Amino acid sequence: MIRALRIAVLGVMMGMAACSTAPATPTLTPSFALAEVATPTDPPPTPSALPLPPAQSETVWLESPFGAEGRVAVLHYTADGTPDGVPCVRFLVETTGAEPRSRCAGSGAGIVVVFSVERDPTNARYLIVAGRALNPAIRTVVIVMRDGESFPVSVDEGGFILILPGERVPAQAVPIDEFGNTVGAIYSF
């Protein structure tokens, strides 16, 4: 099920944040498929046609465009497939050669976050930070870059995502409640 999310996408030229609502129809869905063994006369499979490794209890939390004609899907799941299992987050980018990025929560964590610099179909680079709030009091997560610049991202139905053009390196993710207080530990990348 796809859930809407306000996404902070910062334009290089504009220098300001814009919020949008994610589309309601999923098109990126992880799947597991059996493949036939290729013979030398078969063309090699395209990377987007390769099956993804299955994760237990995976739900698509968000699917959204990124960059020029690119798409990203954020999935929430548990590591052992049970409702009380270790919470995890994964994002998948629909581009040639992109690998899924996943992370599971540590003991007592308030958030779980994964990031990577990915390329869109035009080869432009984007920082993608996706996460999951494990404490319902967390309303915003502030992503702080190594250069000190920070980007507050709203938590919507337990998840958050930040997409920025270029190659940036996050240093911390700070979980914040509705009153502006830090909730639990600050996550260091």
Image (cartoon, helix red, strand yellow):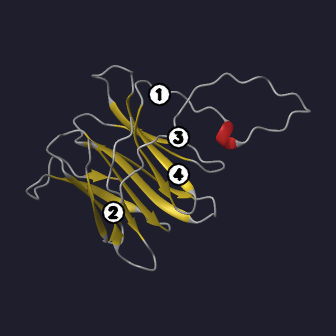
Q: Is residue 89 left or right of residue 139?
A: right
Identify the residue at horizontal 45%, vertical 40% (top origin): 102
Identify the residue at horizontal 82%, vertical 28% (top origin): 38
For the image shown, how many numbered marks are present on the structure? Answer: 4
What residue sits right under mark 4 in the picture? Answer: 71
Number of residues whose C-alpha sits closer than 10 Å to that of mark 4, classed few (under 14), some (14–19) or many (20 or more):
some
User: Mark 3–mark 2 contact, CB under 8 Å?
Assistant: no
Q: Nearer the viewer, residue 161 or 26?
A: 26
User: Mark 3–mark 4 contact, CB under 8 Å?
Assistant: yes
Residue 104: image quadrant is top left
Amino acid type, mark 3: Leu
Tag shown at residue 55: 1
Q: Earlier in the sequence, mark 2 or mark 4?
A: 2
Up-down: is 29 above or below 95? above
Of all residues shown, which one is farthest toward the bottom?
Answer: 13
What residue sits right under mark 2 in the picture? Answer: 19
Tag shown at residue 32: none
Residue 13 x, y percent position in the rendering: 45, 80
Up-down: is 28 above or below 84? below
What residue sits right under mark 3 in the picture? Answer: 28
**C-alpha span from label 4 to label 1:** 20 Å
**C-alpha span from label 2 to label 4:** 16 Å
Identify the residue at horizontal 13%, vertical 52% (top origin): 177
Q: Earlier in the sequence, mark 3 or mark 2?
A: 2
Residue 21 x, y percent position in the rendering: 36, 54
Residue 186 x, y percent position in the rendering: 22, 52
Q: Helix, strand or loop at disc 1?
A: loop
**C-alpha span from label 2 to label 1:** 30 Å
**C-alpha span from label 1 to label 3:** 15 Å
